[in-house]
Image (cartoon, grey):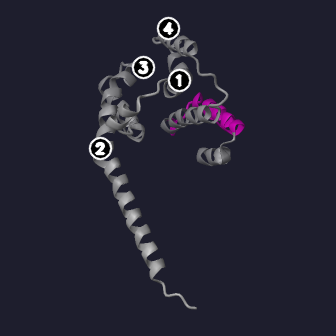
Amino acid sequence: MLPYLFYFFVGGLKRTRLLVLFLIVNLIHFFPMSFGTTYIELYRYFLIGMLLYAWRHVIPIRHRYALIFIVILWVFKESAMFYHLFLLVGAYLVLYAVYKWKLPTSFQVILGNLSYGMFLYGYPLQQVVAYYSPSAHAFLNFIYALPFTLLCAWLSWCLIERPSLQWMERRMARTNHQQAYKENQTPTTT
């Protein structure tokens, strides 16, 4: 049922629909269930990212807010509330980092585009960290997994993603060239 709700509400990225869906998923999260809890967790994080993206022009991105949120996370790091705060406050901090910390272009060119690799490898590597360090709370799990995630993302970019994109560009250029050649070779009737 949850995927159907998800597709219904996400249609068109309407901000109010996303907000309602986020609230529904968070309510479901607090009910004990024998199945689907991992998916509910993933939906929560996915939806907070979608909400922040949909409302990005409305949300004020300020240095002082980021500092306040970092202090809040630090104060509650040993509390049961940390996990729930991390969902909201951590998402804001990601938005803050994206919009306030502009990387120099040369750094991005040297390092490559790691965003997809971080998305792809982040969760599995956090699960590995959780397996080997079950007492680490969410923030420590993130800190422990980050270097490995960056390494895997960089390797993925260098060995898989960039070569695939280059191959696709060459293939598209060849296809476009062949199509243009065929169009020029077509006999015209006068």
Q: Residue furthest bottom?
A: 190
Q: Amino acid at mark 1?
A: Tyr
Q: Which residues are magenta?
A: 15-37
Marks 4/3: CA distance?
12 Å
Q: Which residue is mark 3?
A: 139
Q: Position of residue 30 (x, y in %)?
A: 59, 27
**In the drawing, does residue 169 fall left or right of residue 64?**
left
Residue 190 % position (x, y): 58, 91
Q: Which residue is mark 4?
A: 75
Whether residue 28 is in magenta: the answer is: yes
The residue carrying pointer 2 sits among few (fewer than 14), some (14 to 19) or many (20 or more) residues within 10 Å by Cα, namely some
- Main secondary structure type of the part rendered in magenta: helix
Q: Helix, strand, or loop for circle 3?
A: helix
Q: Is residue 63 above or below residue 125?
A: above
| Residue type (three-letter) at the residue carrying disc 2 | Cys
Which badge, 2 or 3, is on the more N-terminal residue?
A: 3
Q: Residue at x 64, y 44 (%)?
A: 10
Which label's residue is closer to the chain start, 4 or 3?
4
Instruction: Check disc 2 and report the residue beneath it.
Output: 158
Let me know if residue 21 is in the magenta part.
yes
On the image, the x and y values in percent for residue 43 come to: 54, 37
In the picture, residue 69 is in which quadrant?
top right
Amino acid beneath label 3: Phe
Residue shown at 36%/33% (left/top)? Answer: 106
Circle 3 crowding by C-alpha within 10 Å: few under 14, some 14–19, many from 20:
some
Distance from disc 2 to disc 1, alpha carbons, whole Å, reads: 27 Å
- Tag nearer the camera, 2 or 3: 2
For residue 96, the mark is 1
Sequence-wise first label, 2 or 4: 4
Q: Are marks 2 and 4 in contact (CB under 8 Å)?
A: no
